[in-house]
Image (spheres, coloured by chain):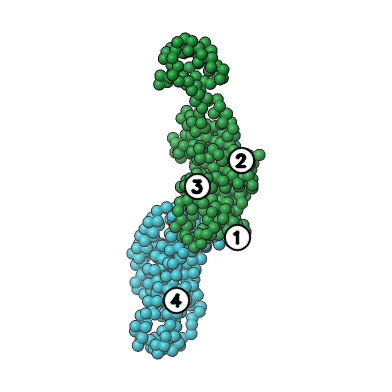
Chain colours: A cyan, B green
Amino acid sequence: MPNDFLHSFQGEWLKRKRSLASWIVVIGGFFTPTIIIIARLVNYEQLAALYAKADFWTSLWQSSWESMAIFLLPLGVVLSTSLITQIEYKNNSWKQLHTVPLNFSTIFFTKLLVIIAMLLQFFILFNIGIYLSAVIPWLLGSGVAYPAATFPYKYFLQENALYFIDCLPILALQYLLGLQYKNFLVPVGTGFILWVGALAALSWKYGYLVPYTYCMYNHLKTAAPGKAAIPALNIHYMAVFYFILFTAASFIIYITKKEKG
Amino acid sequence: MYCLETNNLTHRFTKENTVLKNISLRVTEGSIYGFLGPNGAGKTTTLRLILGLLKKQEGDILFFGKPFERNRVAILKNIGSLIESPSLYGHLTASENLSLLQKIYRCPRQRIKEVLKLVGLPHTGNKKASQFSLGMKQRLSIAVALLHNPSLLILDEPTNGLDPNGMIEIRELLIKLNQQSGITVIISSHMLAEIEKLVTHVGVINNGQMLFQGPLNELKSKQQESVSVVLETSDLEKTVHIIAGHDIKTTQEDGKLHMPFVSKKVIATLAQQLVNNNIELYEISVVKNDLETIFINLISK
């Protein structure tokens, strides 16, 4: 059984090769850091003061996550999750997949795990990108020294974990929609509408009920607390709750489907 | 033992729309079973049901004597299938398409090269499956079905999109697999002529009902039974009277008389009698129905 899972995972991992979803992960991971590098090189005269600051790394982290938490990460998860599930519909291959000697639960969870692994891959690439956005101006000899502040490993790890947890509800709901609908526009369109809804709900006192808000709240709670009605309760628990709820619903719908390809 | 056995398989898409009625397939081990029927007869629905792609509503499905539902994973390890159009990942190469299944089936990596060679696709290199012609996709799908050396191969219209040469190649390949490796093959088609030279057993389905099932020879013996004689004379009334004297019933169609073939001697006697009675004999011929006609007669009943 664990072997089945491992081999199924290897097969599913191979399917994402050369897919648009895998490119989104790579491009998404380096997009914001590239913009930051360009901006810093253009405004190189301000770099010396910036690199000398004690909170250099945390302020870099905040500016890197600004567009990522609000815009790029939620929409990237919507798009890449929908694209991964779409691979089977697009290639008319559900029927092939459902006649291989694997339990339906193995198929369901390995596919989900591949998407989670891709999200993890994105986080790794994004962190590498953030680090490179700090060191590339220094390596290019733009007259700045290596950042004086100590690299806050713990802070980075903690924040990574929180953002990761916060986007799991989006991933789970998009997975549910992606498995259900052959038409790619349904999961993507629904995801987009929910994202717009989440933006609108940020200043509402019950905004935390919208499962697409958590990455935004996590960023805004420290970066711009006045811009949102930051909930008093722990949003990360809410994210875990929604993730479990959507995954369970998705699994039940998938397993009880009368037509499997 | 039957390799595949279904008992009273019935399926409805809606309450009013019963697409399969009491289908009882019997596929003997080592046979090549041709599952025949016109488009919309219920072939694909039957095959999807037996592979678990459709939820079973009524009846039983047994593979190698074991119920499918309770032994799904173990049974699927021994089955290779191709249902309708090819199921290939267009962004991957032929070898990658096989590689992801090779991991699941846990068969030797060497097998990928072997099956690609077997279906005539050894040199596709880095070409993505989406760039393949329909014939190449069909071949690759057969390679996918053969990858894990299954003991039962279920192919739904596998020669769709193949040119005549390709059809012959696939036919020869299936015969070779059946004879050399003992693989049982179930192949569906809407054309008897296409699989007549391939199958050992036949099942004919129409409107969701089995009309015939048995060895191909049994269907061929129906061919013998259906030989008839056609007569055209100057006086049909008198001719009917003379034939009736031999205790033979006739039917009239387009100004010609049709009667069952009895023997050469009776035909000769009849001809003699007609001439002796001054009846001009314009045509006397034996009509032998081919298998295709028998198939069409079966499905148009």
Label count reads 4
Distance from Cα at disc 4 to Cα at disc 2:
61 Å
Are dots 4 and 3 on a single chain? no
Q: Earlier in the sequence, mark 2 or mark 3?
A: 2
Query: What secondary structure is found at the residue carrying circle 4?
Result: helix
Question: Callout 2 environment at 10 Å: few (<14), some (14 to 19), or many (20+)?
Answer: many
Q: Given this view, does label 4 or label 1 mark the residue nearer the observer?
A: 1
- Which residue shows up at 53% across the image and 56% down it? B121
Measured in 3D between alpha carbons, the distance from the residue under mark 4 to the one under mark 1, in whole angstroms, is 37 Å
Quickly name the residue at label 3: B165
Residue type for callout 3? Asn
How many other residues sit within 10 Å of disc 4, few (<14), some (14-19) or many (≥20)?
many
Real-space Cα separation, disc 1 to disc 2, in angstroms: 29 Å
Q: Where is residue A251 in the image (x, y as percent from the top left)?
A: 50, 54
* Amino acid under disc 4: Gly
* Quarter of the image where the N terminus of chain A is located: bottom right
Under circle 1, the secondary element is loop
Secondary structure under the numbered disc 3 in the rendered image: helix
Residue A208 percent coordinates (x, y): 40, 64
Of marks 3 and 1, the one in the foreground:
3
Residue picked out by circle 2: B31
* Structural crowding at the residue carrying mark 1, measured as other residues with C-alpha within 10 Å and reported as few (<14), some (14–19) or many (≥20): few
Q: Give the crowd class for mark 3: few <14, some 14-19, many >=20 residues within 10 Å.
A: few
